[in-house]
Image (tube, rainbow, N blue to C red):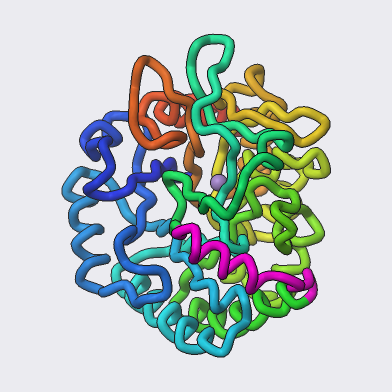
Amino acid sequence: MKMSFRWYGETDPIPLAYIRQIPGMSNIVSALHDVPVGEVWPLDRIQALKHRIEAAGLKFEVVESVALHEDIKLGKPGRDRYIANYQQTLRHLAQAGIQVVAYNFMPVFDWTRTSLSKTLEDGSTCLSFSIEDLEKIDLDQGMSLPGWDMSFQPAQMKALLAEYQGMSVEQYRDNLAYFLKAVIPVAQELQLKMAIHPDDPPRPLFGLPRIVSNRDDLARILKIVDVPENGITLCSGSLGAGPQNNVEALVREFGGMGRIHFAHLRNVKVDPDGDFEETAHLSACGSLDMAAIVRAYREVGFTGHFRPDHGRMIWGETGKPGYGLFDRALGAVYLNGLWEASAPR
Ligand SMILES: [Mn+2]
């Protein structure tokens, strides 16, 4: 297991030097956040980012994310050009020594929350999701959350949502299959591992199709192109927010197949109705048994990257919600402890 930390590049308020001081931290997960979605990532810029990270004493082996242009998700004629660009980006990433590429296939919205600063009992704040609040969101006003791979103006979003009108789950699955059949062979050639991130949260939103929300969805996706390079970013917090999902069992099943290429680890406190809040990583703070999940990774022989996922805001820190230094650092240390304790004696 290699411990990693997401860093948003030069605009991230957290210095790499601080990340380097987290015990056991070896890797940075990042992306070229300023390249418009759908365009090719220039090789020299990927290399510059890598050198910057390496100069801080860290490694850059995992990219999160290379976002997909909506034309690919919608199955529009323009998708072939964007898929060709995607393939070229993968070639550049492989040339720069990247090993894993995370991406998602959520329509329009990346991860969705209804609050970015819900106050917990201890005075810290966290990201949270409430169905009641979701129903109050007026999409005509547009919507954007910090940390999304893309953002939309209200008019743009309205047009995009209209394009998804009537898109069935089956059609949407076909669009993912079309993408995978074009991209996975290239990844194979390059020895790059593709890792799809589950829907966050794993439930229907705004009537849009959702196809990466549970065990059967993941199994179906792996079968579309049944090679090791077609894999998963197993996000405990995303999948764990769905009462239908047993994260430990998912780690054992898909990790046992060697198909989990990247592990996001965080805890969530989930209500039976599907509302949830993101808690500290500790098992006692949320609904997930983090020790059992980490032990499952250990027992399936996981050799990929862990990263502490979203953290709370604590100790007066300000910054990108979910992506502060302090709580994610505590998460990394805790996860390292669980990993160490799960070693065979
Ligand atoms: Mn995640």
Name the side, left or right, on which 298 lies relative to 141: right
Please give the name of the residue rendered at 26% of the width and 66% of the height, measured from the top-left corner: 46
The residue lying toward the viewer, choosing from 182 and 110, is: 110
Q: Eyeballing the image, is 310 above or below 255? A: above
The location of residue 192, given as percent across then percent down, is 47, 70
The image shows a total of numbered marks equal to 0
Range drawn in magenta: 152-170
Q: Residue 31 is drawn in which quadrant?
A: bottom left
59 w.r.t. 48: above or below: above
Which image quadrant is residue 319 in? top left
Question: Which quarter of the rendering shows the C terminus?
Answer: top right
Query: Which residue occupies the foreground of this view, 300 or 334?
Result: 334
> Which SS type dominates the magenta stretch?
helix
Asked whether residue 336 is in view, the answer is: no
Location of residue 156 in the rendering, given as x and y in whole percent from the top left corner: 49, 66
Q: Is residue 165 magenta?
A: yes
**Is residue 63 highlighted in magenta?**
no
Q: Residue at x 28, y 42 (%)?
A: 12
